[in-house]
Image (cartoon, rainbow, N blue to C red):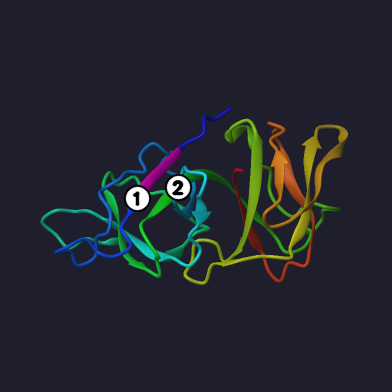
Amino acid sequence: MADKKVTAITSACTLYDGELHRSSENFSLKNFEREADLFFRAYYDYGTAQQTEATEVMFDIWYDEPMRRDPVYLRDIRSGFAAENTAHPALFIANPRGAKKEFTVVAEYGLRVDSQAAIMDDHKHRSSYNFSSTALPRGYLQFHLFYHYGTMAQTAAPGVTFSVRQSRLMHTPVTVWTGVTDGTIVRNPELEKLYFADPENAAEPFTAIITMA
């Protein structure tokens, strides 16, 4: 079982004085595995009773590379964006737009599962390859569904539903969850050989990022 990993960095609502793009101090995502999938959320009043998701805020994440022009890691992202990790040791929030006040960007580990829009050929129920929930911490998990994951065309995939089954050698597969959709929260069963099954209402292949709830 993995430990919960979270990185949080607070950004000003406007650029720092004298800066062309920067609105935060440097931070790193090196506490996550190099090939990890990350899920980014933005909050006002992070960690307090007044915490709310800053859904209207858009921002970039840039690399800090002294002596050269800083390249962009992620551009034009909002709360709820998922992306592959970068091993770069120094990043910063840049070009915040739409923020009412300072906000905090939180990155957490997510498990990626790619699914077909329909049942795979030569299968009765399966629409994805196997995955293991033991890679995520014990507790409750949340599903976040996307079309075109990791591209500039990435969008949420509301309305898609599916089941999750467990493959068992020489035995009938067990249905672990039914009616899973965007935002579904379930308790982590810490099982291996899970797969998506019987998808409905998917316009095209979709990706699930599974995080701690």
Relative side of 36 to 143, left or right: left
| Outermost left residue | 67
Q: Which residue is mark 2?
A: 46
**Which is nearer the eye, 198 or 92?**
92
Image location of residue 70, percent across then percent down: 21, 60
Mark 1 and mark 2 residues within 8 Å of each other at the beta carbon: yes
**Residue placed under numbered mark 1 in the picture:** 10
| Residue at x 35% of width, y 47% of height | 9
* Quadrant occupied by the N terminus: top right
Q: Nearer the viewer, residue 108 or 207?
A: 108
Residue found farthest to the top: 1
Magenta-colored stretch includes residue 170 = no
Residue 9 magenta: yes
Q: Which residues are magenta?
A: 6-10
Q: Residue 209's x, y, as percent?
A: 59, 51
Please state if 157 lies on the left or on the right of 175 as rendered. Answer: left
Numbered circles on residues, count: 2
Q: Say which element carries label 1.
A: strand
Which residue type does callout 1 highlight? Thr
Residue at coordinates 71% horizontally, 51% vertically from top-left? 184
User: Local crowd at mark 2 within 10 Å, few (<14), some, or many (≥20)?
Assistant: some
Residue 58 higher or lower than 111, as above or below: below
Q: Residue at x 63, y 32 (%)?
A: 134
- The numbered dot on residue 92 is none
Residue 175 % position (x, y)? 84, 42
Q: Position of residue 61 (x, y in %)?
A: 34, 58
Main secondary structure along the magenta-highlighted residues = strand
In this rendering, does residue 132 appear at all? Answer: no
Indicate the amino acid at tag 2. Tyr
Q: Is residue 70 visible?
A: yes
